[in-house]
Image (spheres, helix red, strand yellow):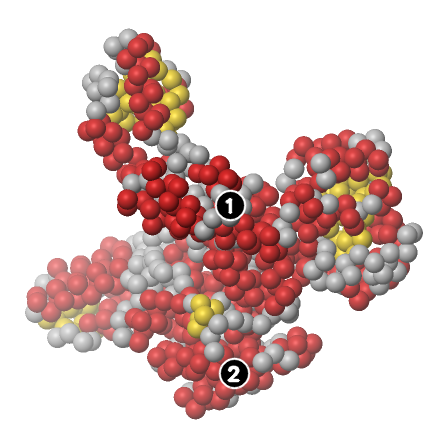
């Protein structure tokens, strides 16, 4: 029997007794030792102290509970609260509670203490600790588990801080913790994903700190930096500072590598961080050391701004160039025009500044929307992963899926703005008993009215029974009363009257998330409804102003459509102007890869010893032409040994390079094709295409990288190159794709 249950049963038994009961009898009734009964009686005694009840315990007398029934009932109510606060029903809840306790304690916690806390067996706690250990390992921390010692978290303080923030992100209702600040300042209980009893753990982790005072300090930082943080960045900084203070009060200060600290001290934000430190020292009984100042600086650099701008390792011109190339990758993936979308460009530029700083200073970020993004925007996520490879290549580090998820939001919004994304159509079957002619008419009417519907088949009600088509379709449109368990049925008139159209629209709108369908009624009145021949009119009258073109289009438009149509035409000309200004010409840009990758810089081999030899072999193609120095090859290998297999950019493809200062004489690219592939220790193994990039500056090679991403996304081209018998054949395939 669980302890909480046993205490309740013991108390209930004592309430029911009119006279004293011996400890021996109690131990037999509850099937535990007399010693355990004595411990339990002590706990019950503590519990009833605040009530007008008394537990009498005398040798040779037994145990007796004295007091009024009303007071006894109050204790029953407290037992109910006790159950709610201590009974954690799922393994996930228990995992989070264990983590909270471990982060709070400096000394080891014994297994039986956790079992008592969670009201479960020691065996269950051991299983929960396996999950805790796995969670910590992903964040660079170890769980020490020793018999007669207990359990304890071990790791660098910087990783502990990141993990504490991650724990709060995962377990707290809002994910970005905006609500946390408001509720804390108002002294309201936190609302967590877990049940009662969890709130205290959050408060204990943050410490008894006035978050309102920390908020005022962060506002000073905003003012000094001349920026405005997004809500999530703002609250994230507050929580970071709260953790820093609580850990410093517990004498757990952070240590930053001396080389990294030197880099941080060169940043302008260090002075703002020092000011924050001084203000915190005035408000709290702590001394903020220089390493903590450095850590605050890192958070200032990694925070995303709503207004203003942040500096990064790349200058503004280089960042702008990187953003344009990332947009180009996604454009090519979807064959869409995004280059004129200023909202996308400015949003990515601000976001990229934060990403670059987070990468450089190893500041992890958690995206609470990641799984939803991957599920609902899978194609955009894949395209964003390709675009993120440009960042990866630039900074010798893999970009996390959490960061890619945020990029996906930017690109997804841009694609929505041009209504580009292909909506998933609702697949339907038509059931009609009035003959082929009526069926055909209904099909035509449905196709004209609903672009979001795909008619899979037309059949009779008898044909529909036990038909495999039921597995393929989403619902049925029928002209006769029909009852199906497996699918919804919408009954309509064979001639599809107005009320039938409204009925189907209502059904689709209710399920627009499931089907990815937008409100069709809105689409009908949108600004996209220009006449079918508007492009030819624009082409024939390109010298006209937008207002003059509207006069040409007026016969085709309803009066209420004119303002939206005018806006669309202005956007059209703005896009064309942007193309001319930046000289974005697809045909010219397709030469970029082959400008750097010449025919004699390609080599095909059957196999090679390992990835180091592969880099040497690919690098030697450039060394032989005096395009790089020998030290450049050595440096590429050193970077992979230091940073890990970041050079794997897509399945079967890696892109190796070093710095401009490492011995580059002229910008160039080489390609080694390995028929049998090599192992790099990455999920993209086996690697069959080893590109080596030697850049002479930070942006001139970017278009070529974009083309390499295009190569990575072209499975047919990759298969052809892998099967090629000669270097000339590989070059010809590349030429066909990037020139023709």
Task: Write the residue at 18% across / 76% down.
Answer: 50
Where residue 449 sits, quadrant-wise, is: top left
To which residue does mark 1 refer? 542
Look at the picture and state if 2 lies above or below 157: above
Q: Residue furthest top?
A: 435
Look at the picture and state if 301 lies above or below 528: below
Residue 51 at x, y percent in the picture:
15, 74
Answer with left or right where residue 556 lies relative to residue 677: left
Residue 417 at x, y percent in the picture:
43, 48
Q: Nearer the viewer, residue 648 or 313?
A: 313
Task: Write the residue at 37% across / 31% down.
Answer: 451
Which dot, 1 or 2, sits closer to the camera? 1
CB under 8 Å between discs 1 and 2: no
Look at the picture and state if 523 lies above or below 413: above
Question: What element does badge 2 sit on?
Answer: helix
Q: Nearer the viewer, residue 496 or 538?
A: 538
Give the number of marks: 2
Q: Nearer the viewer, residue 163 or 728?
A: 728
To which residue does mark 2 refer? 272
Distance from disc 1 to disc 2, alpha carbons, whole Å, reads: 52 Å
Answer with left or right where residue 547 lies relative to residue 257: left
Q: Which mark is residue 117?
A: none
């Amino acid at each position: 029997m669980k302890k909480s249950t046993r205490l309740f049963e013991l108390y209930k038994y004592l309430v029911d007794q009119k006279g004293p009961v011996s400890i021996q009898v109690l131990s037999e009734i509850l099937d535990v030792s007399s010693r355990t009964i004595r411990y339990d009686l002590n706990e019950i005694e503590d519990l009833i102290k605040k009530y007008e009840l008394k537990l009498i315990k005398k040798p040779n007398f037994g145990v007796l509970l004295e007091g009024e029934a009303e007071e006894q009932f109050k204790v029953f109510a407290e037992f109910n609260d006790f159950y709610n606060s201590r009974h954690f029903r799922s393994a996930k809840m228990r995992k989070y509670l264990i983590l909270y306790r471990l982060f709070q304690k400096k000394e080891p916690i014994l297994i039986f203490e956790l079992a008592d806390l969670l009201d479960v067996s020691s065996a269950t706690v051991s299983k929960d600790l396996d999950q805790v250990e796995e969670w910590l390992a992903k964040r660079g921390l170890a769980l020490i588990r020793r018999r007669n010692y207990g359990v304890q978290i071990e790791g660098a303080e910087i990783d502990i801080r990141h993990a504490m923030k991650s724990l709060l992100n995962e377990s707290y209702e809002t994910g970005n913790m905006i609500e946390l600040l408001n509720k804390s300042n108002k002294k309201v209980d936190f609302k967590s994903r877990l049940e009662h009893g969890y709130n205290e753990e959050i408060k204990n982790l943050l410490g008894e700190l006035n978050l309102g005072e920390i908020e005022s300090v962060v506002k000073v930082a905003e003012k000094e930096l001349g920026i405005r943080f997004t809500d999530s960045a703002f609250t994230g900084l507050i929580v970071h500072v709260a953790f820093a203070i609580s850990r410093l009060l517990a004498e757990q200060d952070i240590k930053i590598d001396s080389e990294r600290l030197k880099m941080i001290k060169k940043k302008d934000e260090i002075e703002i961080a020092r000011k924050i430190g001084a203000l915190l020292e005035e408000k709290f009984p702590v001394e903020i050391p220089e390493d903590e100042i450095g850590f605050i600086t890192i958070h200032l650099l990694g925070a995303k701004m709503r207004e203003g701008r942040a500096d990064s390792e790349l200058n503004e011109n280089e960042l702008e160039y990187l953003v344009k190339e990332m947009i180009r990758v996604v454009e090519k993936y979807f064959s869409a025009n995004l280059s004129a979308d200023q909202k996308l460009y400015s949003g990515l530029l601000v976001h990229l500044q934060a990403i670059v700083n987070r990468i450089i200073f190893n500041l992890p970020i958690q995206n609470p929307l990641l799984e939803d993004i991957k599920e609902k925007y899978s194609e955009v996520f894949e395209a964003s992963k390709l675009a993120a490879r440009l960042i990866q290549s630039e900074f010798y580090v893999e970009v996390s899926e959490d960061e890619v998820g945020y990029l996906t939001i930017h690109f997804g919004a841009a694609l929505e703005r041009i209504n580009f994304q292909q909506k998933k159509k609702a697949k339907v079957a038509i059931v009609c008993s009035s003959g082929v002619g009526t069926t055909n008419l209904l099909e035509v009417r449905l196709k004209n009215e609903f672009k979001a519907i795909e008619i899979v088949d037309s059949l009779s009600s008898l044909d529909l029974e036990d038909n495999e088509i039921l597995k393929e379709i989403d619902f049925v449109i029928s002209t006769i009363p029909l009852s199906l368990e497996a699918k919804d049925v919408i009954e309509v008139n064979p001639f599809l009257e107005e009320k039938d159209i409204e009925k189907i629209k209502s059904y689709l709108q209710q399920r627009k998330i499931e089907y990815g369908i937008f409100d069709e009624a809105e689409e009908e009145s949108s600004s996209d409804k220009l006449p079918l021949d508007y492009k030819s009119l624009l082409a024939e009258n390109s010298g006209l102003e937008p207002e003059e073109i509207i006069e040409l289009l007026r016969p085709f438009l309803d009066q209420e459509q004119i303002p939206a149509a005018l806006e669309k035409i202005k956007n059209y000309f703005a896009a064309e102007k942007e193309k001319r200004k930046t000289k974005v010409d697809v045909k010219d840009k397709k030469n970029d890869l082959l400008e750097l990758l010449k025919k004699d810089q390609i080599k095909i081999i059957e196999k090679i010893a390992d990835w180091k030899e592969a880099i040497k072999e690919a690098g030697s193609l450039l060394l032989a032409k005096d395009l790089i120095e020998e030290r450049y090859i050595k440096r590429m290998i050193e970077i992979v040994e230091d940073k890990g297999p970041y050079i794997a950019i897509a399945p079967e493809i890696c892109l190796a390079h070093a710095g401009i200062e490492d011995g580059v004489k002229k910008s160039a690219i080489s390609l080694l094709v390995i028929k049998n592939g090599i192992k790099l220790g990455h999920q993209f193994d086996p690697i069959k295409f080893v590109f080596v990039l030697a850049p002479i500056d930070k942006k001139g090679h970017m278009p070529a990288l974009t083309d390499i991403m295009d190569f990575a996304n072209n499975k047919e081209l990759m298969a052809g190159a892998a099967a090629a018998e000669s270097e000339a054949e590989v070059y010809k395939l590349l030429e066909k794709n990037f020139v023709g």
